[in-house]
Amino acid sequence: MNIVLGVGGGIAAYKAALLLRLFTENGHSVTVIPTAAALRFVGEPTWSALSGKPVHSDVWTAVEQVPHVRLGQQADLLVIAPATADLLARAAAGLADDLLTNTLLTARCPVVFAPAMHTEMWEHPATQANVETLIARGAHVIPPASGRLTGADTGPGRLPEPETIYEVCRHQLEHSGSPRGPQAAPRPDPEGDYSGWRVLVTAGGTREPLDPVRFLGNRSSGKQGYAVAARAAARGAQVRLISANVALPDPPGVQVETVETALELQAAVQAAVGWADLVVMAAAVADYRPATYAQSKMKKSHAPGHEDAAPTIDLVRNPDILAGLVTARGTAATPVIVGFAAETGEPGTSVLQLGAEKLARKGCDLLVVNEVGVDKTFGQDENTVHILRRNGQPQVDAGPAGKEDIAQTILDVARTVLG
Ligand code: C5P
Protein backbone atom coordinates (compact mmCIF):
# COMPACT_ATOMS: atom_id res chain seq x y z
CA MET A 1 0.00 0.00 0.00
CA ASN A 2 1.05 3.61 -0.56
CA ILE A 3 1.50 5.28 2.80
CA VAL A 4 2.26 8.94 3.28
CA LEU A 5 3.90 9.60 6.64
CA GLY A 6 3.68 13.25 7.62
CA VAL A 7 6.05 14.21 10.40
CA GLY A 8 5.38 17.28 12.51
CA GLY A 9 7.98 19.37 14.30
CA GLY A 10 8.09 17.81 17.73
CA ILE A 11 10.70 15.92 19.71
CA ALA A 12 8.69 12.72 19.16
CA ALA A 13 9.71 12.87 15.47
CA TYR A 14 12.38 10.29 16.31
CA LYS A 15 9.64 7.79 17.15
CA ALA A 16 8.17 8.32 13.68
CA ALA A 17 11.38 6.74 12.32
CA LEU A 18 10.40 3.52 14.13
CA LEU A 19 6.88 3.79 12.75
CA LEU A 20 8.35 4.16 9.26
CA ARG A 21 10.31 0.95 9.77
CA LEU A 22 7.18 -0.92 10.84
CA PHE A 23 5.49 0.10 7.59
CA THR A 24 8.39 -0.82 5.33
CA GLU A 25 9.07 -4.11 7.12
CA ASN A 26 5.43 -5.03 6.50
CA GLY A 27 5.77 -4.41 2.77
CA HIS A 28 4.33 -0.91 2.45
CA SER A 29 5.77 1.81 0.29
CA VAL A 30 6.18 4.95 2.38
CA THR A 31 6.69 8.53 1.29
CA VAL A 32 7.77 10.76 4.14
CA ILE A 33 6.76 14.40 4.26
CA PRO A 34 8.48 16.12 7.16
CA THR A 35 7.55 19.71 7.94
CA ALA A 36 10.37 22.25 8.02
CA ALA A 37 10.30 22.12 11.83
CA ALA A 38 10.42 18.30 11.82
CA LEU A 39 13.68 18.44 9.87
CA ARG A 40 15.25 20.35 12.76
CA PHE A 41 14.64 17.29 14.96
CA VAL A 42 15.36 14.47 12.49
CA GLY A 43 17.16 15.19 9.22
CA GLU A 44 16.36 14.25 5.66
CA PRO A 45 18.99 11.47 5.35
CA THR A 46 17.25 9.45 8.08
CA TRP A 47 13.90 9.62 6.31
CA SER A 48 15.25 8.83 2.86
CA ALA A 49 17.48 5.98 4.09
CA LEU A 50 14.67 4.36 6.06
CA SER A 51 12.00 4.82 3.37
CA GLY A 52 14.32 4.06 0.45
CA LYS A 53 12.83 7.05 -1.36
CA PRO A 54 13.54 10.69 -1.89
CA VAL A 55 12.06 12.84 0.81
CA HIS A 56 9.54 15.48 -0.13
CA SER A 57 9.53 18.42 2.16
CA ASP A 58 8.51 21.47 0.17
CA VAL A 59 6.27 22.41 -2.72
CA TRP A 60 9.08 24.01 -4.73
CA THR A 61 11.10 20.84 -5.42
CA ALA A 62 10.34 18.60 -8.45
CA VAL A 63 7.53 20.98 -9.35
CA GLU A 64 7.04 19.24 -12.72
CA GLN A 65 5.74 16.21 -10.79
CA VAL A 66 3.14 18.37 -9.03
CA PRO A 67 3.90 16.66 -5.69
CA HIS A 68 1.47 18.78 -3.69
CA VAL A 69 -1.42 17.11 -5.54
CA ARG A 70 0.00 13.75 -6.59
CA LEU A 71 1.13 12.49 -3.17
CA GLY A 72 -2.28 12.96 -1.59
CA GLN A 73 -4.20 11.59 -4.56
CA GLN A 74 -2.11 8.41 -4.72
CA ALA A 75 -2.05 7.64 -0.99
CA ASP A 76 -3.93 4.69 0.48
CA LEU A 77 -3.39 6.07 3.96
CA LEU A 78 -2.05 9.30 5.36
CA VAL A 79 -0.66 9.21 8.90
CA ILE A 80 0.69 12.24 10.74
CA ALA A 81 3.01 11.41 13.63
CA PRO A 82 3.72 13.41 15.65
CA ALA A 83 0.86 15.80 14.95
CA THR A 84 1.80 19.00 16.77
CA ALA A 85 -0.71 21.56 18.05
CA ASP A 86 0.29 23.82 15.16
CA LEU A 87 -0.19 21.09 12.56
CA LEU A 88 -3.61 20.13 13.97
CA ALA A 89 -4.61 23.80 13.82
CA ARG A 90 -3.46 24.20 10.23
CA ALA A 91 -5.18 20.97 9.18
CA ALA A 92 -8.42 21.94 10.92
CA ALA A 93 -8.34 25.38 9.26
CA GLY A 94 -7.70 23.81 5.84
CA LEU A 95 -4.51 25.80 5.31
CA ALA A 96 -2.17 24.80 2.50
CA ASP A 97 1.02 26.58 3.48
CA ASP A 98 3.43 23.67 3.09
CA LEU A 99 3.62 20.33 1.28
CA LEU A 100 2.08 18.33 4.13
CA THR A 101 -1.00 20.54 4.50
CA ASN A 102 -1.43 20.57 0.70
CA THR A 103 -1.33 16.78 0.79
CA LEU A 104 -3.94 16.69 3.56
CA LEU A 105 -6.30 18.66 1.34
CA THR A 106 -5.82 16.46 -1.71
CA ALA A 107 -5.98 13.08 0.08
CA ARG A 108 -9.23 11.11 -0.10
CA CYS A 109 -7.92 8.11 1.84
CA PRO A 110 -8.17 7.42 5.59
CA VAL A 111 -6.23 10.00 7.59
CA VAL A 112 -4.77 9.18 11.01
CA PHE A 113 -3.38 11.84 13.35
CA ALA A 114 -1.18 10.84 16.29
CA PRO A 115 -0.88 14.05 18.33
CA ALA A 116 2.03 14.68 20.70
CA MET A 117 2.61 17.85 22.69
CA HIS A 118 2.71 19.16 26.22
CA THR A 119 -0.34 18.47 28.36
CA GLU A 120 -1.36 22.13 28.53
CA MET A 121 -1.25 22.47 24.74
CA TRP A 122 -3.24 19.23 24.29
CA GLU A 123 -5.89 20.25 26.82
CA HIS A 124 -6.23 23.81 25.48
CA PRO A 125 -9.76 24.40 24.14
CA ALA A 126 -8.29 25.54 20.80
CA THR A 127 -6.52 22.21 20.29
CA GLN A 128 -9.53 20.23 21.46
CA ALA A 129 -11.79 22.16 19.06
CA ASN A 130 -9.36 21.45 16.20
CA VAL A 131 -9.36 17.74 17.05
CA GLU A 132 -13.15 17.72 17.08
CA THR A 133 -13.26 19.40 13.68
CA LEU A 134 -10.87 16.82 12.22
CA ILE A 135 -12.83 13.90 13.73
CA ALA A 136 -16.09 15.34 12.42
CA ARG A 137 -14.54 15.36 8.95
CA GLY A 138 -13.73 11.67 9.22
CA ALA A 139 -10.12 11.74 10.39
CA HIS A 140 -8.94 9.28 13.01
CA VAL A 141 -7.22 10.91 15.98
CA ILE A 142 -5.32 8.59 18.36
CA PRO A 143 -5.42 10.16 21.82
CA PRO A 144 -1.93 10.85 23.15
CA ALA A 145 -0.60 8.50 25.79
CA SER A 146 -0.03 9.62 29.36
CA GLY A 147 3.43 9.57 30.86
CA ARG A 148 6.77 11.32 31.00
CA LEU A 149 7.00 14.27 28.61
CA THR A 150 10.12 15.95 27.25
CA GLY A 151 11.01 17.66 30.49
CA ALA A 152 10.52 16.39 34.02
CA ASP A 153 6.74 16.74 33.79
CA THR A 154 4.22 13.98 33.13
CA GLY A 155 0.67 13.90 31.80
CA PRO A 156 -1.28 13.22 28.61
CA GLY A 157 0.66 14.33 25.52
CA ARG A 158 3.12 11.56 24.74
CA LEU A 159 3.13 10.12 21.25
CA PRO A 160 1.61 6.61 21.50
CA GLU A 161 4.10 3.81 20.87
CA PRO A 162 4.85 3.23 17.15
CA GLU A 163 3.31 -0.27 17.42
CA THR A 164 0.01 1.23 18.61
CA ILE A 165 -0.03 3.79 15.78
CA TYR A 166 0.86 1.06 13.28
CA GLU A 167 -2.00 -1.17 14.53
CA VAL A 168 -4.51 1.65 14.15
CA CYS A 169 -3.24 2.35 10.60
CA ARG A 170 -3.27 -1.33 9.64
CA HIS A 171 -6.79 -1.53 10.94
CA GLN A 172 -7.84 1.50 8.89
CA LEU A 173 -6.28 0.03 5.75
CA GLU A 174 -8.06 -3.30 6.22
CA HIS A 175 -11.44 -2.16 7.43
CA SER A 176 -12.27 1.25 6.03
CA GLY A 177 -14.34 -0.06 3.13
CA SER A 178 -14.81 3.08 1.13
CA PRO A 179 -12.28 5.88 1.10
CA ARG A 180 -13.34 8.66 3.39
CA GLY A 181 -14.24 11.85 1.68
CA PRO A 182 -13.90 15.24 3.26
CA GLN A 183 -17.63 15.53 3.92
CA ALA A 184 -18.65 16.37 7.47
CA ALA A 185 -20.47 13.87 9.66
CA PRO A 186 -24.06 14.93 10.38
CA ARG A 187 -24.18 17.52 13.15
CA PRO A 188 -25.54 16.06 16.41
CA ASP A 189 -28.77 17.53 17.77
CA PRO A 190 -27.66 20.49 19.95
CA GLU A 191 -30.90 20.28 21.99
CA GLY A 192 -30.54 16.60 22.96
CA ASP A 193 -29.69 15.63 26.55
CA TYR A 194 -26.48 13.98 25.29
CA SER A 195 -25.37 17.07 23.39
CA GLY A 196 -21.67 17.69 24.03
CA TRP A 197 -21.01 14.14 25.28
CA ARG A 198 -18.89 11.64 23.40
CA VAL A 199 -20.06 8.05 23.47
CA LEU A 200 -18.06 5.00 22.44
CA VAL A 201 -20.05 1.80 21.90
CA THR A 202 -18.83 -1.69 21.08
CA ALA A 203 -21.28 -4.13 19.53
CA GLY A 204 -21.50 -7.59 18.03
CA GLY A 205 -19.42 -10.64 18.78
CA THR A 206 -15.74 -11.25 18.16
CA ARG A 207 -14.51 -14.11 15.98
CA GLU A 208 -11.31 -15.91 16.81
CA PRO A 209 -9.89 -17.60 13.71
CA LEU A 210 -8.67 -21.21 13.75
CA ASP A 211 -7.70 -21.35 10.08
CA PRO A 212 -8.61 -19.31 6.97
CA VAL A 213 -12.18 -20.66 6.93
CA ARG A 214 -13.09 -21.42 10.56
CA PHE A 215 -13.48 -19.38 13.70
CA LEU A 216 -14.76 -19.60 17.27
CA GLY A 217 -17.60 -17.13 17.62
CA ASN A 218 -20.80 -16.38 19.48
CA ARG A 219 -24.44 -15.60 18.74
CA SER A 220 -24.40 -11.86 19.40
CA SER A 221 -26.26 -10.00 16.63
CA GLY A 222 -25.11 -6.52 17.67
CA LYS A 223 -28.71 -5.25 17.77
CA GLN A 224 -28.59 -3.96 21.36
CA GLY A 225 -25.26 -2.14 20.89
CA TYR A 226 -26.43 -0.64 17.58
CA ALA A 227 -29.62 0.55 19.27
CA VAL A 228 -27.55 2.26 22.03
CA ALA A 229 -25.37 3.96 19.40
CA ALA A 230 -28.39 5.08 17.35
CA ARG A 231 -30.28 6.45 20.36
CA ALA A 232 -27.20 8.23 21.75
CA ALA A 233 -26.70 9.95 18.39
CA ALA A 234 -30.39 10.87 18.24
CA ARG A 235 -30.05 12.41 21.72
CA GLY A 236 -27.22 14.67 20.56
CA ALA A 237 -24.07 12.67 21.40
CA GLN A 238 -21.07 12.30 19.13
CA VAL A 239 -20.93 8.55 18.74
CA ARG A 240 -18.26 6.11 17.64
CA LEU A 241 -19.25 2.48 17.22
CA ILE A 242 -16.77 -0.39 17.11
CA SER A 243 -18.58 -3.20 15.41
CA ALA A 244 -17.54 -6.85 15.49
CA ASN A 245 -19.10 -9.00 12.77
CA VAL A 246 -22.52 -7.35 12.61
CA ALA A 247 -24.86 -7.53 9.62
CA LEU A 248 -26.78 -4.32 10.29
CA PRO A 249 -26.77 -0.96 8.49
CA ASP A 250 -24.66 1.81 10.07
CA PRO A 251 -26.81 3.87 12.46
CA PRO A 252 -27.30 7.43 11.13
CA GLY A 253 -24.84 10.01 12.40
CA VAL A 254 -22.52 7.39 13.92
CA GLN A 255 -18.86 6.84 12.99
CA VAL A 256 -18.48 3.07 12.55
CA GLU A 257 -15.27 1.06 12.64
CA THR A 258 -15.26 -2.69 12.06
CA VAL A 259 -13.15 -5.33 13.77
CA GLU A 260 -13.06 -9.10 13.79
CA THR A 261 -11.13 -10.44 16.77
CA ALA A 262 -10.90 -9.56 20.47
CA LEU A 263 -7.36 -8.25 20.00
CA GLU A 264 -8.51 -5.99 17.16
CA LEU A 265 -11.41 -4.79 19.30
CA GLN A 266 -8.96 -4.03 22.09
CA ALA A 267 -6.72 -1.99 19.74
CA ALA A 268 -9.71 -0.04 18.43
CA VAL A 269 -11.05 0.63 21.94
CA GLN A 270 -7.64 1.75 23.18
CA ALA A 271 -7.34 4.13 20.26
CA ALA A 272 -10.74 5.69 20.97
CA VAL A 273 -11.15 5.62 24.74
CA GLY A 274 -9.23 8.84 25.38
CA TRP A 275 -11.84 10.61 23.30
CA ALA A 276 -14.88 9.19 25.11
CA ASP A 277 -16.94 10.41 28.08
CA LEU A 278 -19.01 7.22 28.14
CA VAL A 279 -18.00 3.73 27.02
CA VAL A 280 -20.73 1.14 26.49
CA MET A 281 -19.17 -2.30 26.11
CA ALA A 282 -22.08 -4.18 24.57
CA ALA A 283 -19.88 -6.45 22.44
CA ALA A 284 -19.65 -10.12 23.31
CA VAL A 285 -15.89 -10.52 23.48
CA ALA A 286 -14.43 -14.02 23.30
CA ASP A 287 -12.67 -14.90 26.54
CA TYR A 288 -10.36 -17.31 24.73
CA ARG A 289 -8.76 -17.60 21.30
CA PRO A 290 -7.04 -20.56 19.62
CA ALA A 291 -3.41 -20.71 20.71
CA THR A 292 -2.30 -21.20 17.11
CA TYR A 293 -3.64 -20.19 13.73
CA ALA A 294 -3.28 -22.69 10.89
CA GLN A 295 -2.17 -20.83 7.72
CA SER A 296 -4.03 -23.34 5.52
CA LYS A 297 -7.31 -25.15 6.10
CA MET A 298 -7.10 -27.87 8.75
CA LYS A 299 -7.74 -31.28 7.16
CA LYS A 300 -9.37 -34.46 8.45
CA SER A 301 -7.03 -37.37 8.91
CA HIS A 302 -7.40 -40.14 6.30
CA ALA A 303 -4.46 -42.16 7.53
CA PRO A 304 -5.40 -45.84 7.91
CA GLY A 305 -6.38 -46.55 11.51
CA HIS A 306 -6.70 -42.80 12.30
CA GLU A 307 -9.98 -42.07 10.50
CA ASP A 308 -11.66 -41.27 13.85
CA ALA A 309 -8.86 -39.02 15.10
CA ALA A 310 -9.94 -35.49 16.02
CA PRO A 311 -7.65 -32.55 16.74
CA THR A 312 -7.40 -30.92 20.15
CA ILE A 313 -7.68 -27.15 20.04
CA ASP A 314 -5.60 -25.34 22.63
CA LEU A 315 -6.95 -21.99 23.76
CA VAL A 316 -5.31 -18.99 25.38
CA ARG A 317 -7.00 -16.20 27.38
CA ASN A 318 -7.92 -12.96 25.68
CA PRO A 319 -7.41 -9.74 27.63
CA ASP A 320 -10.45 -8.52 29.54
CA ILE A 321 -10.90 -5.21 27.72
CA LEU A 322 -13.56 -3.87 30.09
CA ALA A 323 -11.52 -4.61 33.22
CA GLY A 324 -8.50 -3.00 31.49
CA LEU A 325 -10.50 0.19 30.90
CA VAL A 326 -11.47 0.35 34.57
CA THR A 327 -7.85 -0.14 35.65
CA ALA A 328 -6.55 2.47 33.18
CA ARG A 329 -9.15 5.00 34.36
CA GLY A 330 -7.85 4.72 37.92
CA THR A 331 -9.44 7.35 40.14
CA ALA A 332 -10.53 9.62 37.27
CA ALA A 333 -14.28 10.24 36.96
CA THR A 334 -14.40 9.67 33.21
CA PRO A 335 -15.03 7.84 31.09
CA VAL A 336 -18.14 6.37 32.66
CA ILE A 337 -17.95 2.66 31.85
CA VAL A 338 -20.93 0.40 31.19
CA GLY A 339 -20.47 -3.36 30.97
CA PHE A 340 -22.88 -6.01 29.78
CA ALA A 341 -23.37 -9.45 31.26
CA ALA A 342 -25.12 -12.10 29.27
CA GLU A 343 -25.88 -14.86 31.76
CA THR A 344 -27.66 -18.18 31.47
CA GLY A 345 -27.86 -18.65 35.27
CA GLU A 346 -26.49 -21.67 37.08
CA PRO A 347 -28.04 -24.24 39.40
CA GLY A 348 -28.42 -22.51 42.79
CA THR A 349 -27.25 -19.07 41.53
CA SER A 350 -29.61 -16.64 39.84
CA VAL A 351 -28.70 -14.46 36.90
CA LEU A 352 -28.90 -11.41 39.20
CA GLN A 353 -26.50 -12.89 41.76
CA LEU A 354 -24.03 -13.65 38.98
CA GLY A 355 -24.47 -10.08 37.72
CA ALA A 356 -23.82 -8.54 41.14
CA GLU A 357 -20.62 -10.57 41.49
CA LYS A 358 -19.53 -9.49 38.02
CA LEU A 359 -20.18 -5.80 38.74
CA ALA A 360 -17.97 -6.06 41.84
CA ARG A 361 -15.26 -7.97 39.94
CA LYS A 362 -15.12 -5.73 36.87
CA GLY A 363 -15.48 -2.42 38.75
CA CYS A 364 -17.49 -0.71 36.00
CA ASP A 365 -20.12 1.94 36.83
CA LEU A 366 -23.15 0.11 35.43
CA LEU A 367 -23.69 -3.51 34.46
CA VAL A 368 -26.52 -4.37 32.11
CA VAL A 369 -27.52 -7.93 32.94
CA ASN A 370 -29.66 -10.02 30.67
CA GLU A 371 -30.61 -13.63 30.60
CA VAL A 372 -29.54 -15.43 27.46
CA GLY A 373 -30.16 -18.77 25.88
CA VAL A 374 -30.41 -20.01 22.34
CA ASP A 375 -33.84 -18.39 21.85
CA LYS A 376 -33.47 -15.57 24.37
CA THR A 377 -32.01 -12.15 23.58
CA PHE A 378 -29.36 -13.06 21.02
CA GLY A 379 -30.70 -12.08 17.62
CA GLN A 380 -34.15 -11.22 19.02
CA ASP A 381 -35.72 -7.78 18.78
CA GLU A 382 -36.95 -7.80 22.40
CA ASN A 383 -34.89 -7.82 25.53
CA THR A 384 -35.31 -7.79 29.32
CA VAL A 385 -32.48 -6.32 31.36
CA HIS A 386 -31.55 -5.37 34.90
CA ILE A 387 -29.19 -2.41 35.14
CA LEU A 388 -27.04 -2.84 38.24
CA ARG A 389 -25.43 0.22 39.81
CA ARG A 390 -22.58 0.59 42.20
CA ASN A 391 -22.66 1.72 45.84
CA GLY A 392 -25.88 -0.12 46.68
CA GLN A 393 -28.05 2.07 44.45
CA PRO A 394 -31.23 0.21 43.47
CA GLN A 395 -31.16 -1.62 40.18
CA VAL A 396 -33.25 -0.39 37.26
CA ASP A 397 -35.29 -3.01 35.37
CA ALA A 398 -36.33 -2.61 31.77
CA GLY A 399 -38.41 -4.77 29.46
CA PRO A 400 -39.57 -6.95 28.04
CA ALA A 401 -39.32 -4.26 25.39
CA GLY A 402 -37.77 -3.52 22.03
CA LYS A 403 -34.00 -3.07 22.03
CA GLU A 404 -34.47 0.63 21.11
CA ASP A 405 -36.51 1.15 24.32
CA ILE A 406 -33.96 -0.78 26.36
CA ALA A 407 -31.24 1.43 24.84
CA GLN A 408 -33.13 4.54 25.99
CA THR A 409 -33.28 3.25 29.57
CA ILE A 410 -29.56 2.37 29.56
CA LEU A 411 -28.78 5.89 28.31
CA ASP A 412 -31.13 7.45 30.90
CA VAL A 413 -29.27 5.71 33.73
CA ALA A 414 -25.81 6.40 32.23
CA ARG A 415 -26.75 10.08 31.84
CA THR A 416 -27.32 10.35 35.60
CA VAL A 417 -23.79 9.00 36.20
CA LEU A 418 -22.28 11.46 33.70
CA GLY A 419 -23.79 14.25 35.81
O1 C5P B 1 -17.05 -11.65 31.87
P1 C5P B 1 -18.01 -11.45 30.76
O2 C5P B 1 -17.51 -11.89 29.43
O3 C5P B 1 -19.39 -11.99 31.03
O4 C5P B 1 -18.20 -9.86 30.75
C1 C5P B 1 -18.97 -9.24 29.78
C2 C5P B 1 -18.58 -7.80 29.68
O5 C5P B 1 -17.16 -7.69 29.63
C3 C5P B 1 -19.07 -7.17 28.41
O6 C5P B 1 -19.28 -5.78 28.65
C4 C5P B 1 -17.93 -7.40 27.44
O7 C5P B 1 -17.93 -6.41 26.41
C5 C5P B 1 -16.71 -7.30 28.35
N1 C5P B 1 -15.60 -8.18 28.00
C6 C5P B 1 -14.39 -7.63 27.67
N2 C5P B 1 -13.30 -8.43 27.37
C7 C5P B 1 -13.41 -9.77 27.43
C8 C5P B 1 -14.64 -10.35 27.78
C9 C5P B 1 -15.71 -9.52 28.06
O8 C5P B 1 -14.29 -6.41 27.62
N3 C5P B 1 -12.36 -10.51 27.13
Image (tube, rainbow, N blue to C red):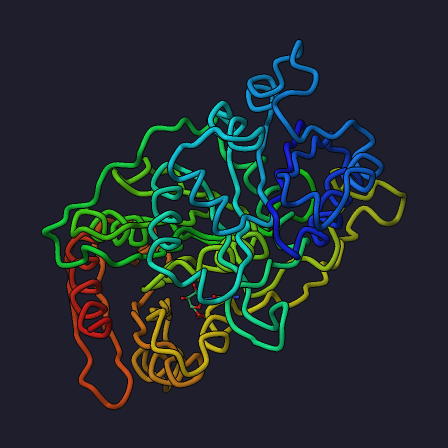
Placement of 153 over or under 228, stated as above or below: below
The answer to which image quadrant residue 414 occupies is bottom left
Locate the N terminus by quadrant: top right
The answer to which image quadrant residue 72 occupies is top right
Observer-nearest of 89 and 380: 89
User: Which residue is most to the right?
Assistant: 304
Locate the C terminus by quadrant: bottom left
Q: Is residue 197 left or right of residue 321?
A: left
User: Which residue is most to the bottom?
Assistant: 392
Q: Position of residue 291 (x, y in %)?
A: 72, 59
Which residue lies at the image location 48% right of the left edge and 51% below the top edge? 85
Q: Is residue 53 left or right of residue 63?
A: right
Numbered disc total: 0
Which residue lies at the image location 29% right of the left edge and 84% below the top edge? 390
Which residue lies at the image location 54% right of the left edge and 46% below the top edge? 260
Placement of 54 over or under 410, stated as above or below: above
Observer-nearest of 104 and 225: 104
Q: Position of residue 341 (x, y in %)?
A: 37, 69
Placement of 129 over or under 341, stated as above or below: above
Observer-nearest of 309 and 317: 317
Q: Position of residue 287 (x, y in %)?
A: 55, 65
Observer-nearest of 368 and 21: 21
User: Which residue is most to the left?
Assistant: 191
Q: Position of residue 25 (x, y in %)?
A: 80, 41
